[in-house]
Image (spheres, rainbow, N blue to C red):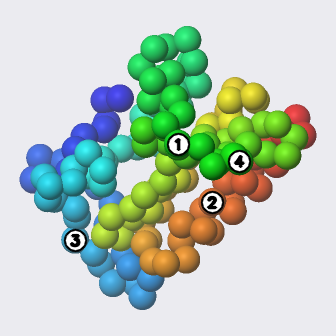
């Protein structure tokens, strides 16, 4: 993942797009070290596709550990930084999402069909996370039919 780094800095800011809030205002880059592991990752769709390929390799011990169940509510489970949902047809979706000032992300894996989807936006407001989750699920429905 050669184009992935922690936090915006003067060394990489020229490669980053601008982020906006829901009203179209430019937002500052996330630069605090305090939460860099939770919200300070800058990446590209290409690097994240490589990450998806890795996360679909369940023979990899680190992958298995990162997705191993630590909490179970029945249909939903949580494993480290991943959420997991079991659909009525038995298929699972494993996802993580997040955002910082002006940016929202959603990455979901569908192990039974060996697929994953990543959606990145440069807008952040209360509605964006739900919208990109819905878009991702519509893509999944199309993928399932193939």
Question: Residue 91 vs residue 29: left or right?
Answer: right
* Above or below, comparing residue 82 to residue 69 in the picture: below
The local secondary structure at tag 1 comes to strand
Q: Nearer the viewer, mark 2 or mark 4?
A: 4
Q: Earlier in the sequence, mark 4 or mark 3?
A: 3
Cα separation, mark 3 vs mark 1, equals 35 Å
Cα separation, mark 2 vs mark 4, equals 18 Å
Q: Earlier in the sequence, mark 2 or mark 3?
A: 3
Q: Are marks 3 and 1 in contact (CB under 8 Å)?
A: no
Q: Are marks 1 and 4 in contact (CB under 8 Å)?
A: no
Residue at mark 4: 75
Cα separation, mark 1 vs mark 4, equals 11 Å
Query: Does residue 15 appear in this view?
Result: no
Q: Residue at x 55, y 77 (%)?
A: 127
The x, y position of residue 76, in whole percent, is 64, 48
Question: Residue 125 vs residue 91: left or right?
Answer: left
Residue at mark 3: 28
Residue at mark 2: 133
* Above or below, comparing residue 13 to residue 4 in the picture: below
Cα separation, mark 2 vs mark 3, equals 24 Å
């Amino acid at each position: 993942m050669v184009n992935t780094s922690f936090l915006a800095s003067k060394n990489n800011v020229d490669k980053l797009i601008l982020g906006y809030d829901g009203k179209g205002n430019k937002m500052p880059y996330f630069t605090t070290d305090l939460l860099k592991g939770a919200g300070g990752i800058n990446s590209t769709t290409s690097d994240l596709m490589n990450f998806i390929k890795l996360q679909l390799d369940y023979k990899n011990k680190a992958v298995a550990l990162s997705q191993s169940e630590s909490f179970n509510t029945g249909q939903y489970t949580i494993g480290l930084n991943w959420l997991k949902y079991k659909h009525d047809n038995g298929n699972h979706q494993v996802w993580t999402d997040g955002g910082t000032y002006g940016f929202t992300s959603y990455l979901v894996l569908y192990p039974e069909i060996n697929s994953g989807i990543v959606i990145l936006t440069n807008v952040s407001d209360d509605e964006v996370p739900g919208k990109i989750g819905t878009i991702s699920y519509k893509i999944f429905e199309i993928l399932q039919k193939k």
